[in-house]
Image (cartoon, rainbow, N blue to C red):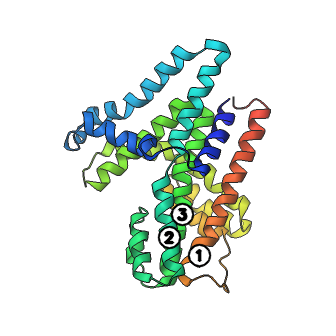
Amino acid sequence: MALFSFLVAMFVERLKFLPAFLQFDELMRQYQQSFWRVDSLTHTHIALIAIAIPAVCVFAIRYLLDGLFFDVFSLAFSVFIAVICLSHQSIRHIFKKYIQAACRGDVQACFIYAGKLDCHECLKAVNENELGKRVGETVAWINYRYYGAVALYFVVFGPVGAVLYCSVRYYHDLLAMHKVENTWVELLLLALDWLPSRIFSFGYVLSGQFSQGFGAWRRTALTLHANAKDVVSKTAMAAEELPEQSDAPVCVRSTLALLALSKRNLLLLVTMLSVLTIFGVVS
């Protein structure tokens, strides 16, 4: 049921059916502004309560719906949660604007949109080629953070796991944006990302250049303290053979190559989850 819900959610996300006010980050923004001030989130217990409440609510609703009408309501609720967690049209819109700016040769606009993709290193790029590589790394990271990790948590732990991961991710980004420190939130996201990032990044190895990708994956993934972004982005960069000749603008060649690799990796993940579901490893 979890895999079916995830596949339906991916289909709906691609068709852009879900309005902006029902997408996860927007719902969390409304929830946070209604109940929690940003400065109060410096207190660990308040931050953890704010993070836990959405997951607890999902767990309670799932418990109440369990067994009703042959689990049809429970399935519908799971699909709804999956759609909410996987819908990020704002990120897609920014990336589309970046590609359009590159195609019309507007390098300055490329740097602006690159900065909006949550890539802190993009604006430090010294040339168009470097910018393309930085954005390519960001595409690989976003693909993991907003789709790959959510898929893994959803299939293994159900809607509760997906909502918990997305909540931690949201508050981590919120605190970073307001330059507010909370070590426990950072450690919690680090723990939640540790294993999924290594599993997902190994998919880049299988989807791209195996020898180079495996070398990068081994150096980063087998290092206990390597952060998830380094594991994912460095493995993706090593696994994809960037084209030397292309008609595409310089600042999108690396980006488009890594985007194609990310799509192949996500397809591989869905295939593997399907196989595990068939054999009863995951439900």
Tell whether label 2 touches label 3 (CB within 8 Å): yes
Q: Mark 1 vs mark 3: which is more N-terminal?
A: 3
Q: Mark 1 vs mark 2: which is more N-terminal?
A: 2
Disc 2 residue type? Val
Disc 3 residue type? Val
Residue labelled with disc 2: 135
Q: CA distance from mark 1 to mark 3?
A: 10 Å
Percent position (x, y) of residue 73? 60, 21
Question: Which residue is drawn at the image coordinates 62% and 61% (left, top)?
Answer: 217
User: Which residue lies most toward the left here?
Assistant: 39
Picture quadrant where residue 37 is located: top left
* Residue 65 in sight in this render: yes
Residue 139 image label: 3
Q: Residues within 10 Å of mark 2 (few under 14, many from 20)?
A: many
Question: Which residue is drawn at the image coordinates 65% and 39% (left, top)?
Answer: 8
Q: CA distance from mark 1 to mark 2?
A: 8 Å
The quarter of the image holding the C terminus is: top right
Vertical relation: 149 (above or below) 44: below
Percent position (x, y) of residue 116? 39, 64
Observer-nearest of 259 and 97 = 97
Question: Which residue is drawn at the image coordinates 42% and 70% (left, top)?
Answer: 113
Question: Which residue is drawn at the image coordinates 49% and 51% (left, top)?
Answer: 88
Residue labelled with disc 1: 254
Task: Report helix, strand or loop for mark 2.
Answer: helix
Task: Report helix, strand or loop for mark 1.
Answer: helix
Percent position (x, y) of residue 84? 50, 40
Tell whether label 2 touches label 1 (CB within 8 Å): yes
Vertical relation: 31 (above or below) 252: above
Vertical relation: 12 (above or below) 219: above
